[in-house]
Image (cartoon, coloured by chain):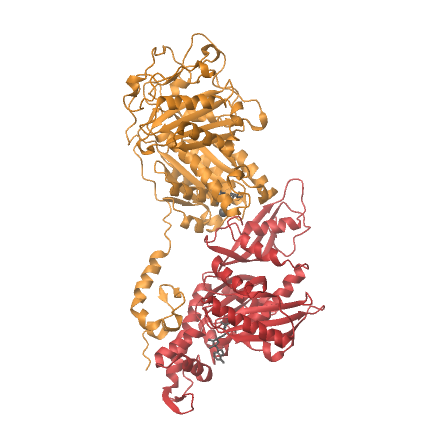
Amino acid sequence: MASSDLMVGLEIGTSKICVVVGEGRPDGTIKILGVGQAPSRGVRKGEIVDFETAMKCVHEAVVDAETKSDVMIRSVYVAISGSHIQSFNNRGAVTLPEDRDEIDEQDIEDVKINAREVSIPAQNAFLHSIIQHYHVDGQDGVLNPVGMLAEKLEADFHIIHGVRTRIQNTIRCVKELPLEVEDVVFSALASAQVVLTPNQKGLGALVIDIGGGTTDYILYVDGAVKQSGCLGVGGDHITNDISMGLRIPMTRAEKLKIDEGSAVLGNCLPGETVQLRDDSGFAGKEIERETLNTIINLRLRETFELLKKKLEEEPFINYVGEGIFITGGCSHLKGIAHLAEEVFELPARVAHAQTMSGLTSAFENPQFSAAIGLIKYAQAVQTDRPRPRRFGRIFGKLFNGMRLS
Amino acid sequence: MIQLSRNYTLPEREDEIIPIRVIGVGGAGANALDRMVLDGLDKADLVVANTDVQSLASSVAAAKVQLGRTVTRGLGTGGDPELGYDAANESADEIRQALADARLIFICAGLGGGTGSGAAPVIAELARESGALVISFATMPFGFEGKRRMAQANEALVRLQESSSAVICFDNDKMGDIVAPKAGIHQAFAAADVTVSQSVRSIVNLIQRPGLIRIGFDDLLSALRSPNARCLFGFGESDSDNRAYDALTQALKNPLMDRGRLLADAANVLVQVAGGPGMTLSEVESLMQELNRHVGDETQILFGTAVDGRMGNRMAVTLISSLAADGAVVERPVFTAPAAAPKPTYIPPVEPKAVPPAPVPAVSLDEDIGEMMFTPEPPAQPERPLKTIEAKMSAPEPELEIAEPEEFEPEFVEPSPAPVLQAAPPPALIEPEPEQPRVILPAKKKALPAVVEAKPAVEKIVQAKQEVLQFESVTRGRFEKSEPTIVEGQDLDVPTFLRKNVRVK
Ligand SMILES: Nc1nc2c(ncn2[C@@H]2O[C@H](COP(=O)(O)OP(=O)(O)O)[C@@H](O)[C@H]2O)c(=O)[nH]1
Ligand SMILES: Nc1ncnc2c1ncn2[C@@H]1O[C@H](COP(=O)(O)OP(=O)(O)O)[C@@H](O)[C@H]1O
Ligand SMILES: [Mg+2]
Ligand SMILES: [Mg+2]
């Protein structure tokens, strides 16, 4: 890459691999230079199960992106998904030494390290420690405590972690191409960067990214991440259900879902059918529309219900003022927002990346939210740390995953 | 000359086991405990105490105490010792229960974080209140963990010393040369766990092993008693041809021993030599001679031996001692001025030449040994002060005669100005009758109260898998290669309509 302002996001999704090349502008905006794609093989439920095949697909998508953006790609930000990803909130604290009463940068680092002082399963590594709020000597809601006078600094973090080997698998897949991995980012966190405005994060919002094999979610209240995670269920499950329920091949089921499916019931005439056509265009099996929709509805309703139950383990869902933002390929399904409203009893809408200059047609597709979000994430990180520390970040992360932190 | 008196008692019976409890506090404590379980420690009950439920759930210890249910809500302390302190206080009752009826309590904690640093001193206090002897094993953070941790650890150490009978403090940095220099933090901690585990186990064994010369609590205390003691600890084991020498060399190699150099300044050194029935007196003697080269002239050696059938051909040496911090002059509270007639103490010969050849070479230290190795003149034991060393030794009444008896008197002198670590042994430990085994009040081992039943969700998942089996063959389809998505006992890869029994045609 010629300029360090160039940023590349890579999502190795269950359905497709997506590479977005973006350029950060001095005024803080981002221009998308190109989007590369390839169908994804060797990936199930967000995780690589066939290394060689997945690598070929990633290569294909990268080459595509290079061609489209006319940029040589050397390093990427990578989205991570999979049901092994978990999160919790924890508070860290540091007491200032006797001889100093002003909070400094080191205290901020230390408090973050201390917040990770909770054991995660031995095989896991930390992905993110996202600051929620600082508390200075018991005073809540401090945004930037550096320089404040205090005896004790506390900070609440949202901590996201996942199985180390699975995260490493993804990293390895990219490194063997070979590409440098700048950072790994939980995919819902990436999506939220472009699906939500800062204002919506402030008012409270739930982002649900439903892809091929996973449903990734992240919930913001008061501008801070409160809950996040991943359910290993996605569009593939809908397709599989249709394939089994209607006894048709997966490819047919997929097409039927996309072309005819709906998440809501009661919108079709009694006995209304869909004519399945084979590849040659000849009419084939007849399928009752309400049956198709019932299969889809049952699956999506269940997915939302499970998610709701999970979220209701904590109180935050009650403070989501802006409601639900559904993104990812499955958000294309007719009636999905309606169903979400019904289950969550909250306003819901389908969302894709908010406007950035560049290839509009590319980023107005909710399937690209995560990959485009990575660019926004990268921009934020690079503004935070002007010097790119390629190795530092990754190593820091894996190191932090060990018992010390 | 090492002599064993004739009137030794037979090794204690199996049920005469002293109730010992080992409690691991915080993440490091829990890991050290797990190590002990892996290495095998069956003569003590293990309790893990942590704020962090994840860590509790994964611990293999039999009894678990969740600290600070309300103050930490099952998470850690975020490195905040105050929170650790509050958490322990909140759970004081459960801690008391878990420690009840123990005579000797070991507390293991890594200092520097929140739980270990904040809770361990509280737990030590509670343990002391229960009347037990409390020995704390603390690790100090590695240098690279940063100044803040070190400061936090130092503060915690002071508190722990105030509340424990003795503190054995391991410097993680000092344990460094066990670990290859480039080894990751993981290995470094694992190595520390091994050392802590080994120390605890060897001390437990030292107390529980049926001893010919039984080492008691207070010998232990004497060895550990120094102001702000820095513990010297070494353990070695060997089954080589030269096992006595090799075991000792290995023990001296322990980083806490600084290759034995530090022993020169120690006031008391406790030595236990354990071996199988084949262990010979000459071996023990040569070992003691060798050890003698490493200790100062003034050093008191508290000596014990044990025969343990399970040791087989191996011979093990445990060395425990302490040094006053920063070269402070070591107090010699127990043994002071020479007095009248030679009285037995446990000082091995100072000069090798003073050691007579082994009376009967290569005699087996089995039950007959008492007959074969006897003291020509059982020392007169008149008005023996209650607290002299031999008053503290258990019945076997071994005597290690000193070479220059005039210089060392076991005459008990008031313990000099109480060092931090000094604890009056709990009253129960002092047996007025020297003939009786001292420390051993054969209390039946009590089952630990099950404090927390931390049961991982395994059961649930297993159920789920069974429930789902019936679908498996037909329905894996697309998800064949992937891990099943199991949520709340349901395999979500199975079509929803199937699981909900909705008929589709
Ligand atoms: N031996 C050992 N020491 C550890 C381990 N983990 C952490 N430590 C040390 O113990 C200190 C406290 O960490 P930890 O026990 O996790 O914190 P706590 O649970 O809040 O008390 C750290 O600063 C390390 O020096 C471990 O697994 N083994
Ligand atoms: N128009 C559409 N209608 C319904 N489902 C769709 C549509 N387009 C894509 N999908 C579904 O979205 C899923 C892929 O979403 P995507 O976000 O690209 O997934 P991933 O990030 O996991 O690769 C697939 O299951 C696909 O069937
Ligand atoms: Mg996706
Ligand atoms: Mg911990």
- Residue B264 locus on image (x, y percent): 53, 23
Furthest-front residue in this view: B241
* Quadrant for the N terminus of chain A in the image: bottom right
Q: Nearer the viewer, residue A48 or B435?
A: A48
State which quadrant residue B359 falls in: top left
Instruction: Check the rendered structure and report the hue given to chain A.
Output: red
Residue A60: tell me if it is visible. yes
Colour in which chain B is drawn = orange
Q: Is residue A220 among the parts visible in the rendering?
A: no
* Viewer-side residue, B222 vs B280: B280
Q: Is residue B320 left or right of residue B376?
A: right
Relative image position of residue A370 (x, y in whole percent): 55, 70
Residue A152 located left or right of residue A215: right
Q: What residue is at 60 percent from the left and 74 percent from the top?
A: A65
Residue lying farthest to the bottom in this orientation = A282
> Which is nearer the eye, A21 or B145?
A21
Q: Residue furthest top?
A: B340
